[in-house]
Amino acid sequence: MNDGDATAVLELRDVSKSFGPVVALRSGSIRVEAGSIHALVGENGAGKSTLVKVVAGVYRRDGGEFLLSGQPVDFGSTAESKNAGIAVIYQEPTLFPDLSVTENIFMGRMPTGRNRRIDRAGMHREANALFTRLGVHIDPRRPALGLSIADQQIIEIAKAISLDARLLIMDEPTAALSGNEVARLFAVARSLRDEGRALVFISHRFDEVFDLCDTVTVMRDGSYIATDRIAETSESQIVAKMVGREVGDLFPKSPAPLGDVVLDVRSLETAGEFHDVSFQVRAGEIVGLAGLVGAGRSEIARAIFGVDAYDAGSVTLLGKAVPPHDPRAAIRAGMAFVPEDRRQQGLVLHGSVGKNIASVIRGRLDRSGFLTAAAEYKAARPWASRLEVKTNALDMTAATMSGGNQQKVVIAKWLATDPQLLIIDEPTRGIDVGTKAEVHRLLSELAGQGLAILMISSELPEVLGMADRVLVVCEGRITADIARADATPENVMSAATRSAERTAP
C-alpha cells in the first residue's frame, strides 16, 4: 500500500481475525484519507464485512495494526468506535419505529432545558438544520415507522453528522434503493466528502463505484490485494483482482434439449397484483421473468408456489393440478422456491449449514420419530459439496456466512428435495461477480440435467444471458414472450413499459 505523506483518518495494516478454525481475515489492509470516498470491493467471503466489524468495534482483531488519525486504537465495543467518530451505515438501518425521526437522531443524548425537561423544539430545529445541510427534506416530527430504506439511511447519516463522525462506512447502502434514491444518497456522500470527512463505500455495483469513489481497495480470500485510483483502473482489472482470474464469461449458458411441459400456468389472477397470466416451462428450459420493479414478477412466483393465494386460474405440474395457497402441496408435487429475501425467508440464520440444507427434507430423515444431527449432516454434505459452499464445517452458523455462501445454502436446501421445477427469485442479488458466475453455471448444469427453471431477475444482462425464453411482465400482465435469439435490451424494455403506453390517452 502507498503510505503517502498525509495522516490517514483510518489505516489498517495486516489485520487478522479468526473464529475457531475459520479464518475470516488473513491480512486486511486499507488506508482512507480525509476528503475522499474509498471503495472496498471483493467477492463475498473476501473479508470485507469482518474488516468493517473490526473498525466498528463488533470484533476485536487477533493481529495487525489499527490506526485512527495516526494513533493506535483497539475498540472493545461499538460504543467506543462511535465515540471515536466512526459511523457505519448499513443496507437496512435499525431505527426505533415508534419513535420520531428526531428522537432516533438524538437517542441517548436528548438535550434538556428548564426543569430538566427534554428540549423537543430545540431537537427539531437541529434535526431540520441537519437535513438542510444534507440537502434532503424529511419531517423530523414524523414517526420512523413507514419510512423508506433510503430515508432511514439518511437519518443514520444525520445522526452521524450530529455526533461529528469523521469516518462513515456505507455497507451495501444502495441494494434496496431506486435510481432517484441512489442519486440522492450519492449527493449526500459527495457533500460529506467536500466537508473533509472520510467515507468507505462497499458495493458489488461497479457502475456506482466508478461514479462515486476516488480510490478502490480490492480484497480476496481474507487478504489485501491492491489499492488503485479509480481514474487509473478499469472494471475488468478490478474483477481480475477480485477473483484471481479473468472472468470472460459471466453467463456460462449451455444449450439443453427441451423435454415435456413441467409447469403449466393458466389464466392466473389476483386482484391488484397480476392478471390473466398464462405460460409454460419445459424440462431443461430456463424461462426468465423480466420487468420493472413492482411489475408483479415476485407476486406471480409466490402464487405459483402457494405462498400467496390467487383469485382465479390454475397451476399444474407434470399434468397434475397443484392446490392453491399450499406450499407443502407444491413441494410434494415437485416444486422448489428460492425466495428473493434469502435472509428473512430462505434461511434459519441461527441454524447450522447442515440443518438449513436438510430443513425441507427432515420428514424423510427421521427414524421412528427421531431425527439426529448426524442424519441431517449426512443428507446435507453432498449438496454442500456440490455447490462448493465455502465453509469448513456443516455446523457453521448460517448468519456468519457471506451472502454468496448463504445463497448457495438456500439453493442446496431446495435441490435436496429433488425437484422437477426450480423457481428462483433474484438468484444473484447482492453477491459478487465470481459467485454470480458459479450460480449461473449451476443453473445451466441443472437445466442440462432436465430441471425446469423459472428465474426472476431485475438484472437485464442476467435475464438475457441465462434465459432460453424471456417473459416480460408489465403492470401485472405478460406483455411479451421472447425467444433467446430475439431478446435484446431494447425489445425487453419496450415490452416492460408497454402497458403504460397502451393505457396512455
Image (cartoon, rainbow, N blue to C red):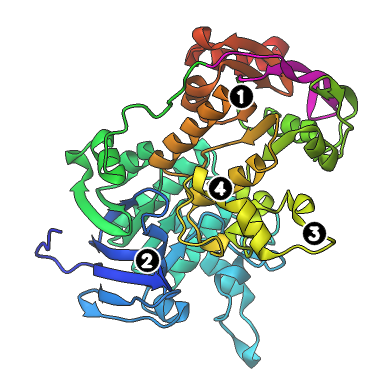
Residue beneath label 3, please? Answer: 367
Please state which of the two labelled residues, at mark 1 or mark 3, is closer to the viewer: 3
Magenta extent: 256-284
Q: Amino acid at mark 2?
A: Val
Please state which of the two labelled residues, at mark 3 or mark 2, is closer to the viewer: 3
Residue beneath label 1, please? Answer: 291
Whichever of labels 2 and 1 marks the residue nearer the N terminus, that label is: 2
Whichever of labels 1 and 3 marks the residue nearer the N terminus, that label is: 1
- Which of the two residues, 456 or 3, is positioned nearer the viewer here? 456
Residue at 48% across, 32% down: 440
Q: Is residue 117 magenta?
A: no
Q: What separation in Å lies between label 4 and label 2 (alpha carbons)? A: 23 Å
Residue beneath label 4, please? Answer: 382
Q: Are marks 4 and 2 in contact (CB under 8 Å)?
A: no
Q: Is residue 406 above or below residue 301?
A: below
- Which of the two residues, 79 or 76, is positioned nearer the viewer here? 76
Whichever of labels 3 and 2 marks the residue nearer the N terminus, that label is: 2
Residue 294 on image: x %, y %: 67, 32
Q: Amino acid at mark 4?
A: Pro
Q: Amino acid at mark 3?
A: Arg
